[in-house]
Image: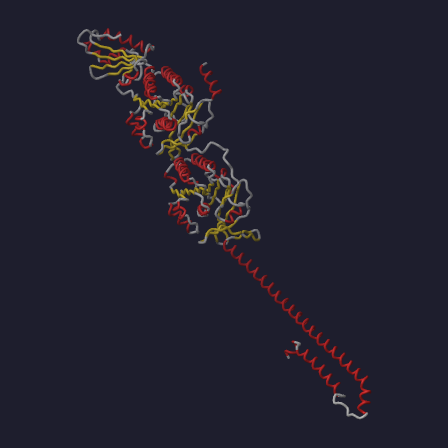
Amino acid sequence: MAMNKRKRIDEIAGVEKAPTGIVGFDSIIGGGLPRGRTTLVLGGTGAGKTVFSLQVLVGGMRQHGEPGMCVSMEEDVQQMIVNTAGFGWDLPGLIRERKFFVIDARMGPGIVKAGAFDLTGLLAEIKAHADKIGARRIVFDSLDSLLTLLDDPKAERQELYRLRDWLAENNLTGIINVHSEAGLVPFPRYGFLQSMVDCVVVLDNRMVGDHFSRILRIVKCRGRRFLGNEFPMLIDSGGIQIAVGPQKSDYAVSSKRVSTGIGRLDDMLRGGYYRGSSVLITGAPGSAKSTLVGAFLEAACRRGERALYVGFDEAVGAILRNLASVAVKLEPYMKSGLLRVHAVRAEDQRAEQHFAKIAALLREQKPQCLGIDPISALLQSGPVQVAVRITKHLLDLAKVEQITVVCTSLLEGINVQSEATPIQVSTIADTWIHLSFAIHAGERNRALTVIKSRGTGHSNQVRELVLSDEGISLADVYSSGGEVLMGTLRWEKEIADELERLCARTEMERRRRELELAEAEAASHAELSTRELKARRAELALLQREQELLEKRWTEDPKQRLKVRSGNKPTPTDVPSTTRYTAAALEAVHSARRHDPKRSRK
Amino acid sequence: MSKRGASGTRFVFRLYIAGDAPHSAQAVANFKLICEKYLQDCHQVEVIDVLKDPLSALKDGVLVTPTLIKVSPAPPTKIIGDLSQTTKVIWALGLGEMKHE
């Protein structure tokens, strides 16, 4: 009856949340633990129950100003302080500020049980202290010794209900830790415990193959939507973290492009990668995957963007040297701080630890471009399913932060169409570029293919990836007679093509010269004709003049002769004058002929 | 509720109870019987209600109710429960031997 009433109220108002401040946990439980309710934390030895519950308290104290209390039945205050010193929580400081109080509730070995008892007294004591510091959250760590002491299933049940109801009455957010070696298998003894409380969290540390793995799982949380999957958990210098990506899928999507660092690859992808997208580069060892990552990050830094390079294969020095050999120079950007290189051996840490570190680096470096080389190395740092999950979380995280990621994955097989990278990035990635070796005519050449590129057209052409001291370039591959030509064959084909062009050019030149000569000849003919025309005209004019003169003489001569014969000697101009005029005309004709180039040559 | 021996007090007890909770009431009644039987006139009992004075109970390391503490003679002994298992109580307090004396 009471339960029904509570449930109905939950549905109307929604259960209030008590955010834990544990990275990743609040997002999978929908905001935080149910406030004013009881949460049961189950787990085996060393699964992290104490750290988890104390961290919820510290989160409440530090982030939400909610004082907390721990009823410690396993360790005293000093032990607790020492054991958690590595997490930077400063429990002594919190105790001094009266935000935190520890009730040392160890039963002690000498205790004698002589009959039934209950928790009424304990709860009264706790209440008194809770009131003193105004506690809002309370942890029972752990209830096992008490339950052992009760030694009666009926009594256990009765006291646990008493505890739960007391927490609810006092509006305290409670965490009860109970040891359970059974791990994730059903807990026959605590079955009722799970049904009694509002929220159950199971922690587990186990070996999967030869990998140690920490897992957190939310079994139930009343009135709340939560993610019930197993999540990789890690305990590091900040306490517990859940390796989980952001739980939202409505991130901003950009249609802006970002250069791949290789001009012709940009062209193949119609302008480059989409900003904020994830790119997978697969290929056999030595197929220049890292080089493409380096080129991408160098281009980013050249534009003044911040970048992060996560390398699982090599040391920082080796990464820089190898990239410098193909003219990808990252060192200056490292010095200026634009680029950060994080080199770590994959097998040294677990996948979830790598995740936490990369997530922390993303917060510090705030990169716009991220390279992970190779992301498949995570497979060496944990069970396959954990590595796969971590990879997805990483890419999700980058996506939400609008970071363009280029990651590589080792793919031994040539058969790309098997469609599955071992780490299953190929399905998540927006763009998938495959590098392969084409072995032909005694050569091994690198071929680049764009297998997929979501939301953008891309070239279907295979290109040859050419690495040299001057840098990286993509060359067209020739296909002749159904065969793809690369390397020397491509080079020979290129030379042959060049020769062909040269011949064609020479032939054109020859024909042009011939035509020019013909044109010049025609022009000089025209010139000669003009001169001849002039000469003929002059000749004609002279002839005309001569004729006129003769005509005149012939008309005047008889009178003249008459006059002369009447007494005078004939004048010297008489007859020879005709001869002289004729000679002058001839001279003019000769002079015109002398100007003729053909004649002058002679 | 406290019983005092007239002279030569050898046993000092503190009995922590939680109001009139059934287990607490039971413990008071059971302890009364034990004292009458084994500790006639040689014990002193202080009954403390945790609900009224919760802070002093914690100082004494008392968590559950009811709890009986033998303050003296040394060593201090802590017995939890409603004291219905009389043999256990007598054994824990070392009273069995005394009866033989």
Q: Could you tell me which quadrant the C terminus of chain A lies in? A: bottom right
| Image colouring | secondary structure
The reply to whether residue A245 is visible in this rendering is: yes
Specify whether A55 is left or right of A411. left
Q: Quadrant of residue A67?
A: top left
Horizontal and vertical percent for residue A413?
A: 48, 44
Specify whether A484 is left or right of A560. left
- Residue A317 vs A101, above or below: the answer is below
The reply to whether residue A115 is visible in this rendering is: no
Specify whether A409 is left or right of A270. left
Which sits in the foreground, A433 or A513?
A513
Horizontal and vertical percent for residue A494?
A: 53, 56
Q: Quadrant of residue A306?
A: top left
- Residue A162 vs A554, above or below: the answer is above
Horizontal and vertical percent for residue B80?
A: 29, 15
- Residue A125 vs A392, above or below: the answer is above
Horizontal and vertical percent for residue B77?
A: 24, 16
Which sits in the foreground, A554 or A15?
A554
- Residue A513 vs A166, above or below: the answer is below
